[in-house]
Image (cartoon, rainbow, N blue to C red):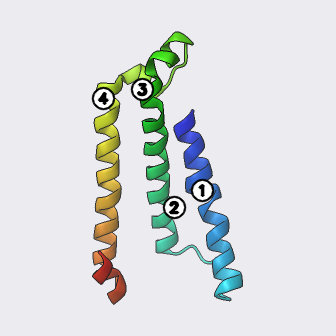
Amino acid sequence: MAPFTLVILMGLLLQIPFFIHSQTYVLGRPFIMTRSFIFTTAIMSIFAFVNGLLKDLPDVEGDKAFGMQTLCVLLGKEKVLPLCVNLMLIGYGGAIIAGSSSSSIISKLVT
């Protein structure tokens, strides 16, 4: 439950209003769904999901004792930790590819 809650809060409810505010009030542009907005929202959703999974890892025994059906309880710590590492690598790899293929020279220099 925690990973999906974090995806909704950190990946969607935090990113979308901030982007709309910065586009309309700070930059004075109309709100348009850009590639950077979709990419940032997707990356933050992946990171929030991984954060939620990693948060559940230390408390697997307690979750089992109280009958909680978390992904860490169902799959076990041995499978969830590599899953988290691979999801983070996918997120960072996607950021590197997107930054290096950007038309902005600043994005290319940073990545």
Q: Which residue is drawn at 57% across and 45% down?
A: 6
Inter-mark Cα distance, 4 to 2:
26 Å
Which three-letter amino acid code belongs to the residue tagged 4? Lys
Left or right: 92 with respect to 67?
left
Q: Which one is earlier in the sequence, the residue at label 4 or at label 1?
A: 1
Q: Which one is earlier in the sequence, the residue at label 4 or at label 2?
A: 2
Q: How crowded is mark 1: few (under 14 residues within 10 Å), some or many (20 or more)?
A: some
Inter-mark Cα distance, 3 to 2:
25 Å
Q: Which residue is drawn at 33% across and 75% down?
A: 99
Q: How crowded is mark 4: few (under 14 residues within 10 Å), some or many (20 or more)?
A: few
Q: Which residue is drawn at 29% across and 52% down?
A: 89
The image shows residue 69 at horizontal and vertical percentages of: 51, 20
Q: Which one is earlier in the sequence, the residue at label 4 or at label 3?
A: 3
Left or right: 93 with respect to 13?
left
Q: Which image quarter holds the N terminus?
A: top right
In the foreground, 30 or 86: 86
The residue to which callout 4 is attached is 79
The numbered mark at residue 41 is 2
* Element on which disc 4 rests: helix
Q: Residue at x 49, y 14 (%)?
A: 64
Inter-mark Cα distance, 4 to 3:
8 Å
Question: Can residue 30 be seen in this snapshot?
Answer: no
Q: In this view, does 71 lie above or below 45?
A: above
